[in-house]
Amino acid sequence: MKPVVLVTRKLPAAVEDRLLRDYRPRLNPEDRLYDGDSLIESAAGADAIVACHTERFTAQVIDRLPQSVRILANYSVGFDHVDIDAAKRHGLVVTNTPGVLSDATAEVTILLMLGAARRAGEGERLVRTRTWKDWSPAFMVGTQVTGKRLGIVGMGRVGQVVARRARGFDMTIHYHNRRRLPPDQEQGAIFHPTPEDLMPNCDFLAFHCVSTPETRRMLNTERIALLPDGAVVVNASRGAVVDDEALIEALKSGKVAAAGLDVYNNEPNIHPGYRDLPNTFLMPHIGSATKETRDAMGFRALDNLDAFFAGREPGDRVA
Ligand code: DGY
């Protein structure tokens, strides 16, 4: 008998086709959002769940999941929506999809850097609302990206691709990571053992770390004060790494010239302060949103399921 798989969101057609071929999937053609209760109800009798970061697998939800569910194969690299300790307690296998979204996410980071530094949001609004009046030497002057210092927090797969792309803009790469990378991965990037060491070297600061209790609100008032005046902050990792009040204050004072954000605390109901500021360039969590990457994420999640049900260790097991 093919295993029953609850699929929490509508996935790309090629991924759903493979699910239909190899499993008995419970698909979600309307792409409706599950909350804790409806997740538990819909998982009745399922052997596995393919989930996204839009569902929260708290300890309470995991405690109440039917015992038949043995694996949670996430369609995401981030797994901060899953209480990993609770999963381990229940023997629930959890996997993610690393690697396949590095290029797409790095593209969005470069977009955020350029968009924030060159005031793309403001410019687009002017053109669209017919309020663009004139050209002048002082009009829409932003911050040049080329040749600047880029500080990257979290030099994993995505951080390293961002560094490679940024070198195309002659940027000097500084980074902070839990451990220093070997020279072949560092590629000349300058390691800083603490965020405090990194901050003064960041004309641009990009976050690519995972959201953990240690990285939560890593960008706070104290660390912002260590940035050079007029720095640009971008975030395509998780909103939780930023203290919103602190960043908004710094954007208002000009300490931070601009911010490019793709991820937020409490998505999609983000801190309203970001919307009101002219110097924010805001995207709706689209880091991995390319056809190629969304297919690859699905196939990676299914590779993990296939391995599990064939009695092998899934390649991307995180619990
Ligand atoms: C990820 O894979 O973590 C992306 O943020 C989408 O969930």
Image (cartoon, helix red, strand yellow):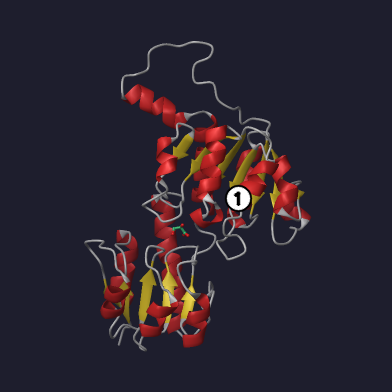
Mark 1 CB near ligand 1 (8 Å cut) = no
Quadrant for residue 51, please give it: bottom left
Residue at 61% in and 35% down: 255
Give the image location of residue 223, x and y in percent: 66, 48
Is label 1 in a helix, a strand or a loop? loop
Residue position for label 1? 220
State the quadrant of the N terminus. Answer: bottom left
Give the image location of residue 218, x and y in percent: 61, 55
Horizontal arrangement in the rendering, residue 31 relative to residue 262 (left or right): left
Residue at 40% in and 64% down: 298
Q: Is residue 21 visible?
A: no
Residues 71 and 284: in front is 284
Position above or below: 24 against 204: below
Q: Give the crowd class for mark 1: few <14, some 14-19, many >=20 residues within 10 Å.
A: some
Position above or below: 125 against 60: above
Q: Is residue 18 visible?
A: yes
Residue that sits furthest to the left in the current view: 30
Residue at 64% in and 44% down: 224
Give the image location of residue 31, x and y in percent: 26, 61
Give the image location of residue 123, x and y in percent: 42, 25
Q: The disc labelled 1 sits on which kind of residue?
A: Asn
Horizontal arrangement in the rendering, residue 143 relative to residue 119 (left or right): right
Quadrant for residue 254, please give it: top right
Residues 231 and 118: in front is 231
Residues 210 and 221: in front is 221
Horizontal arrangement in the rendering, residue 258 relative to residue 227 (left or right): left
Q: How many marks?
A: 1
Position above or below: 168 against 306: above
